[in-house]
Amino acid sequence: MSNSLKAINKKISKRKQVYKPLLDNPFTNESQVWPHVNDQQLVWELLQSDVLSVCKRLKDSDRSEWPLDVAFTFNEINEYLCNNDKDEEVLMFACNRDQGVPSVLLQQVPLIAYMSKTKVTLIQLPRNSAQVIVDSLPLGDDSFDGFLMVRCNEKINAHFMRTIKSKVSEQKIPWLTNLKYQKANIKLVKTTIPMISKNKNKQPNQKGEDLENQKQEKYTNTHKQIPKK
Amino acid sequence: MSAENAEIIATKPPKNASNKEQFQRINYLYQLSMHYKNANLDISRTYVNLLDTISKKTNTKISPNIKRSYCKKCKRLIDYKDPKMFKVVKSKNKKNDKFIINCKCGSKKTFPIGLNRDYKTYTEKEGNLLEI
């Protein structure tokens, strides 16, 4: 056998890299699902000063007494968006770049927001914003789902609402309204497979030998039991 | 180079995907089922059933993102307008938090989100999925 670098590498390596084709969702487009936010820092500062500071101050009091209508659990948000028939507007802040927010929830919320009769403005928040929100909300022992919904009614500051809306582009999910054929989105999954040596039959490993011995014993035992005619 | 990488023989990614016709077939069926989702539920379910069978018989892989969008039992596509469809079940122990997708047929998809809140499927992780 040659002593080339490739041959030595083959001897040492236990796994080989392979690329398997996979069909990705033709409708998934991150940039369309999550609308772009211009001047994200300003939006974050406005949220902190106008909403989170109020929530933090009234953390211990009853939520019905709050001067804002906010929802922060997934179930609450889902129920409101699906059941509300009124022509209302809401601001939905999402910590989609933070750690600790389950990706399964993040996949559903933009679609629920888009399909809702309520007009939802989806706003991405900068990284590490989830912890600040957790500190401001009365979550108790519950974990934070990564979303904060603020209802745009007379209770909220109109300037705050207008500024935030002007900074966020519109959410576009074309496949939910006018379905157009999309080309097959085939991608490759980068993965590895174990290397199987060709001389496996010649030099069986310990486990293989044990199995062979067991088979041999079984065979001899069964043949012993058969009475000779 | 790390020791983990040293044990893997690197190969170049192929320029074309094999079994392309089957992927295109599945893709077309998925989009048809989406199209008929509201108009005719039975046809939509039939298409999903067909694409699922084709992927199994031809050994073509579908991303978890697509597979999560329909019920495994009745092949119905997820209805985002139904408030009963999604539910987060929280318990005292945060590790037992669950996200449940309830189908109209009664079957449930349960995701134990509390176990690892940062969990991502292999294809969702950066660098594992390559464009052709």
Image: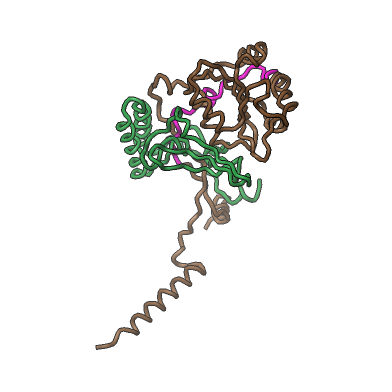
Chain colours: A brown, B green
Taking A51 as reference, is B115 left or right? Answer: left
A224 vs B34, nearest the viewer: B34
Q: Residue at x 33, y 82 (%)?
A: A223
Taking B66 as reference, is A72 left or right? Answer: right
Q: Quadrant of residue B18?
A: top left
Taking A181 as reference, is A200 left or right? Answer: right
Residue B127 point in image, percent of width and height: 57, 37
Say whether residue A38 is magenta.
Answer: yes
For the C terminus of chain A, the image quarter is: bottom left
Say whether residue B47 is magenta.
Answer: no
Residue A49 point in image, percent of width and height: 73, 20
A127 vs A91, nearest the viewer: A91
B48 vs A89, nearest the viewer: A89
- With respect to residue B78, does B119 lie above or below? below
Residue at the far bottom: name it: A229
Q: Residue at x 56, y 17 (%)?
A: A89
Residue A96 point in image, percent of width and height: 61, 30
Residue A122 point in image, percent of width and height: 57, 22
Q: Quadrant of residue A8?
A: bottom right
- Magenta range: A20-43
Q: Residue at x 62, y 32 (%)?
A: A146
